Image (tube, helix red, strand yellow):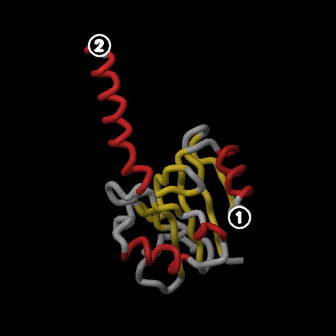
Amino acid sequence: MTNVASKTLTMIIAIGTALTPVLCCAYALDAQLDCKSNAHAFIAPLLTAQYIDPKPMRVEANSINAFRPAHDSNLTAFGFRVYAVLGYEHSDTMFKQGSGQPITDSAYGTVVVGATEDVEARVRAAGSDAVIRQVIPLLLTVIFCSAQ
């Protein structure tokens, strides 16, 4: 085997080995995004397991709290990387109140990195009736569940 071929093979093995833990350790939120739960039940386990930072990075006027995934948490939703985890539940000290009227008594979801059409296709294929909205065209999409 030539020196170049040997180095190329070594590089491929090293890259494959480096990517394996990322794929094995991803924590998928798909089942929780079936919209049959509430914000407390969605957010509390993520806080306990330290998958998200306990302090919201942003609190919207409608009281939706946006939590940043913890470093190396590798959260996914329907195969897309999670950019932020969203939630609010009325009278729950886990969530901060915004300056305006709360959106609802309980709401939760995620912001994922992916095009809206692709995200919606996977969410519907999984049987979820979550609301899908574009945040940034071709880049960020929100998957959102709220109590009626």
Residue 39 is left or right of residue 53, and the answer is right
Q: Which mark is residue 2?
A: 2
Classed neighbour count for the residue bearing mark 2: other residues with Cα under 10 Å, few (<14), some (14–19), many (≥20): few
Label 2: state its secondary structure.
loop
Residue 34, compared with residue 6, is above or below; it is below
In the rendered view, does 3 fall on the left or right side of 123?
Answer: left
- Residue plotted at (48% across, 70% down): 99
> The C terminus is located in which quarter?
bottom right
Q: Image point 55% across, 40% down: which residue?
A: 139
Picture mark count: 2
Q: List the residue tagged with mark 1.
A: 128
Q: Bin the neighbour count of mark 1 within 10 Å (Cα to Cα): few under 14, some 14-19, many 20 and up.
A: some
Residue at horizontal 52%, vertical 80%?
41
Residue 20 in the image, given as x and y percentages of width and height: 39, 47
Vertically, is 121 above or below 48?
A: above
Residue type of the residue flagged with mark 2: Thr
Which image quarter is the N terminus in?
Answer: top left
Q: What amino acid is labelled 1 in the image?
A: Ser
The secondary element bearing badge 1 is classed as loop
Residue at the left extreme of this rendering: 3
Compare residues 23 and 48 and report the one nearer the observer.
23
Q: Is residue 103 left or right of residue 126?
A: left
Circles 1, 2 touching at the beta carbon (< 8 Å):
no
The image quadrant of residue 104 is bottom right
Residue 69 lies, with reference to residue 8, above or below; the image says below
